[in-house]
Image (cartoon, rainbow, N blue to C red):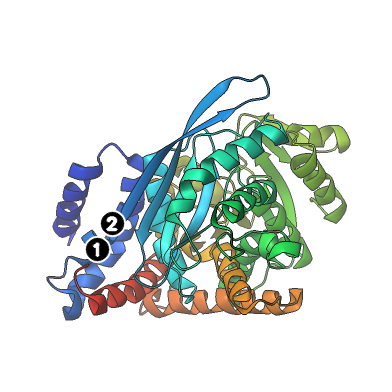
């Protein structure tokens, strides 16, 4: 089996060897899906995984815009339309200086499986730019977004490709992007998700990824007759996902003790309660400040510069920052300090060494394509509401979100549980996501 996986990866490397994040994502899927493909005669000779790995379409374009000093700036824009076998392309836009083809292809590939797991009719895609919104004025961001959309609008639509937000793209950016799309197309359609409530957005959408990550952790704990109540939790990041993961974990009776950003992490032994979280939201969402400022407001907390929080003691870890933030050595530290639940809120936050460490230790470990699917699931619910020209209540959306996360958990158990009862959530998520897309691709022929 190893030789078959290695042969597949060698072929992928010949085409994509300079794209390490993408190679990592494919490797993680190949290790579990190729053995399943070999065991299922229906997939023999169809080269189905190779077809999934190759994007259906890759669009790159120049984004020229003018800053507040009148200087002309140039960034690069992307849209990766990975797979549309089960629905229109769906996936976020990321604005960050690290954005490149490798990162967006890995995100788009992960999105195919994640969207499949939600059971909603959504294909996989991803896009963005190497533009950095940090330190930019609202007018500069508006001008950039408008320029970005003047090219992107040609490639998207409510039945073709429905982008959403991601790192660096929040409600402000979605508003500017949608306004320009509406002007260019002269139509009001559900082409972007993450919109404001008054113009087509869905309740719970900002909270959904963080909430869903905690709901998935709770579902894993229930298989052991346990719950989040009383657990000590490490959360990385301090953006949208981290904020709402902290909120939901606290509501379920857990104590969150860390948050972080690129400058380092804070540790608050007393727990980050609702009042402290409100301060963090004001700091990060309104003032655009750094997490280090937390310790000025709450002097009993500590700030550690340039480090991630994974060497602190905990029961549950929720990586909610970015890809490859949790390395093999970090995983060993977590395990040594008593961590027995990891639910990923970010996309591929654990590197392959960390993933293997969690699987070898047989802890409750959920990969992002399963545990953070709540965000795109609620984006799918926003698309449904847009199509119906109606809005569901907060309670209705939250109920549907919990139901979707429970269904994803059940699918992971179906394909990931061994004869001893241990659930390999990586295997379960990969195979469950693969089957729906693969069957649709087989039905539609070689296209």
- Mark 2 touching mark 1, by CB under 8 A? yes
Is the residue 113 above or below the residue 175 in the image? below
x, y percentage for residue 349? 50, 48
Q: Quadrant of residue 259?
A: top right
Report which residue position mark 2 lands on: 53
* Front residue of this view, candidates 189 and 16: 189
Question: Along the horizontal axis of the image, is 247 left or right of 437?
Answer: right
Is the residue 60 above or below the residue 26 in the image? above
Report crowding for label 1: few under 14, some 14 to 19, many 20 or more residues within 10 A (C-alpha).
Answer: some
x, y percentage for residue 46? 16, 70
**Residue 332 in sight here:** no
x, y percentage for residue 213? 60, 63
Q: Residue at x 72, y 38 (%)?
A: 266
Report crowding for label 2: few under 14, some 14 to 19, many 20 or more residues within 10 A (C-alpha).
Answer: many
Circle 2 SS class? helix
Q: Residue at x 31, y 46 (%)?
A: 23
Circle 1 SS class? helix
x, y percentage for residue 179? 64, 51
Report which residue position mark 1 lands on: 49
């Amino acid at each position: 089996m190893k030789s078959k996986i290695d042969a597949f990866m060698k072929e992928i490397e010949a085409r994509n060897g300079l794209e390490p994040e993408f190679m990592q994502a494919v490797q993680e899927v190949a290790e579990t899906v190729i053995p399943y493909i070999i065991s299922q005669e229906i997939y023999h000779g169809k080269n189905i995984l190779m077809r999934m790995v190759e994007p259906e379409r890759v669009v790159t374009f120049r984004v020229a815009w003018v800053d507040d000093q009148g200087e002309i700036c140039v960034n690069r824009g992307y849209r990766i339309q990975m797979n549309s076998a089960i629905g229109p392309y769906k996936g976020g836009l990321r604005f960050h200086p690290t954005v490149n083809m490798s990162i967006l292809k890995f995100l788009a590939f992960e999105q195919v499986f994640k969207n499949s797991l939600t059971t909603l009719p959504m294909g996989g895609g991803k896009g963005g730019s190497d533009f950095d919104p940090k330190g930019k004025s609202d007018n500069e961001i508006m001008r950039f977004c408008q320029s970005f959309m003047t090219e992107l609008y040609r490639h998207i639509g409510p039945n073709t490709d429905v982008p959403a937000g991601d790192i660096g793209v929040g409600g402000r950016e979605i508003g500017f992007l949608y306004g320009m799309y509406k002007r260019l197309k002269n139509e009001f359609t559900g082409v972007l998700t993450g919109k404001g409530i008054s113009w087509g957005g869905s309740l719970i959408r900002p909270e959904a990824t963080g909430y869903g990550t905690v709901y998935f952790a709770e579902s894993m704990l229930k298989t052991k007759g346990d719950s989040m109540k009383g657990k000590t939790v490490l959360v990385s990041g301090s953006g949208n996902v981290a904020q709402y993961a902290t909120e939901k974990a606290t509501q379920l009776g857990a104590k969150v003790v860390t948050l972080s950003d690129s400058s380092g992490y804070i540790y608050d032994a007393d727990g980050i309660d609702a009042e402290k979280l409100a301060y963090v939201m004001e700091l990060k969402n309104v003032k655009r400040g750094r997490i280090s400022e937390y310790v000025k407001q709450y002097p009993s907390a500590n700030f550690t510069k340039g480090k991630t929080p994974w060497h602190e003691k905990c029961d549950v870890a929720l990586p909610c920052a970015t890809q490859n933030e949790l390395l093999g050595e970090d995983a060993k530290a977590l395990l040594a300090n008593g961590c027995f639940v990891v639910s990923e809120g970010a996309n591929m936050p654990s590197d392959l060494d960390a993933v293997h460490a969690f699987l070898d230790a047989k802890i409750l470990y959920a990969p992002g394509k399963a545990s953070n699917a709540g965000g795109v699931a609620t984006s799918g619910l926003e698309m449904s509401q847009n199509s119906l020209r109606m809005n569901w209540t907060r309670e209705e959306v939250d109920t549907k979100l919990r139901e979707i996360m429970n269904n994803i958990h059940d699918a992971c158990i179906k394909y990931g549980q061994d004869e001893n009862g241990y659930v390999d959530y990586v295997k379960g998520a990969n195979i469950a996501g693969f089957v729906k897309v693969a069957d649709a691709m087989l039905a539609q022929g070689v296209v």
